[in-house]
Image: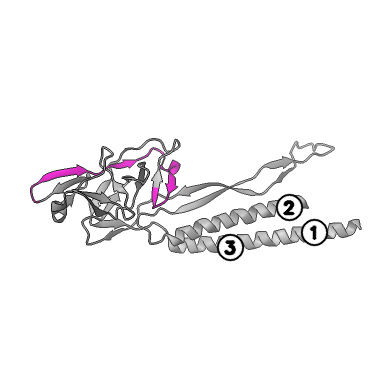
Amino acid sequence: MIQSTYTARSGLIAQQQRMDIIANNMANLSTTGYKSVRADFKDALYQTMVRPVQPQNGLNLERGHGVLLGATMRDYAQGTPQQTASALDLMLDGDGFFAVQDSDGETVYTRDGSFSLSIEDTSTFLVTTDGRYVLDKDGKPIDIKSTVTDNLAIKGDGTIWDTSNGFQIGQLGIHTFINRQGLEAVSGNCFQATDASGEAIASTATVRQGYLESSNVDLAGEMVNMIRAQRAFSLTARALTTADEMDSEANQIRR
């Protein structure tokens, strides 16, 4: 009976993890550029039971040991565009990420194009909402002269222009990866490259100025998934209770 208890326990843990992931998706419904996550499960190790006589059909008698969280997969589908009144709000149409610099000087990547300006001494840098520098195609912070903030135009290829004199200020660093599922999520709605994702490569995504990308979370779908996870959790808890009752009955028989 002990094995059935551990098997049911693995189911409870798996469904709790699934509900945690669903709850996080729902919490980020309004997060700009957020990509929803789903849980993929796999069955645990099987044990072939020993029998004194092998059946003529040659089939093994196997017993499962529950379920495990196999992987979390991120949905990189395009979110809905939302038009804003800010020239510093940018959206990527297609497969790509903005390159930004975190507090440790490391390059991370984001779909959140809600940018602003940060004045430091004689420079005016393009930054994210949490103060990360937005990087150009060469991996350097973008310095936008304070005198051109009212005449700023960003074209589809990411080039930044001063419309008052036709001068190009720079070009946004826009990258993608061979395996986006290999990216590791970090704080601030950002991702960092890993060995699994491969190195960043140039992206052909189009920049849309004056737009932000909404989260791609499907609220109705997440609500349905949460109900299913709760029901599965309840049924597994009932199985655990039944296993415990059977174990108690077995102990009574021994007496």
**What amino acid type is highlighted by mark number 2?**
Ser
The numbered mark, 2 or 3, whose residue comes first in the sequence reads 2
| Whole-percent x, y for residue 165 in the image | 7, 48
**What amino acid type is highlighted by mark number 3?**
Gln
Q: CA distance from mark 1 to mark 3?
A: 24 Å
Q: How is the image coloured?
A: one colour
Q: Is residue 210 magenta?
A: no
Q: Which residue is mark 3?
A: 230
| Whole-percent x, y for residue 27 in the image | 45, 61
Is disc 2 in contact with disc 3, using a CB cutoff of under 8 Å? Answer: no
Instruction: Determine the residue located farthest toward the right in the rendered image.
Output: 255
| Whole-percent x, y for residue 139 in the image | 28, 39
Q: Residue at x 38, y 62 (%)?
A: 30
The numbered mark, 1 or 2, whose residue comes first in the sequence reads 2
Q: Which residue is mark 2?
A: 4
Mark 3 residue element: helix
Is disc 1 in contact with disc 2, using a CB cutoff of under 8 Å? Answer: yes
Mark 2 residue element: helix
Task: Write the start and end of the magenta stretch as one range.
Answer: 164-190
Q: Nearer the viewer, residue 41 or 182?
A: 182
- Vertical relation: 8 (above or below) 100: below
Q: Which mark is residue 246?
A: 1
Q: Residue at x 43, y 43 (%)?
A: 183
Decide: few, some or many residues near mark 2? Use Cα within 10 Å; few <14, some 14-19, many ≥20: some
Decide: few, some or many residues near mark 1? Use Cα within 10 Å; few <14, some 14-19, many ≥20: few
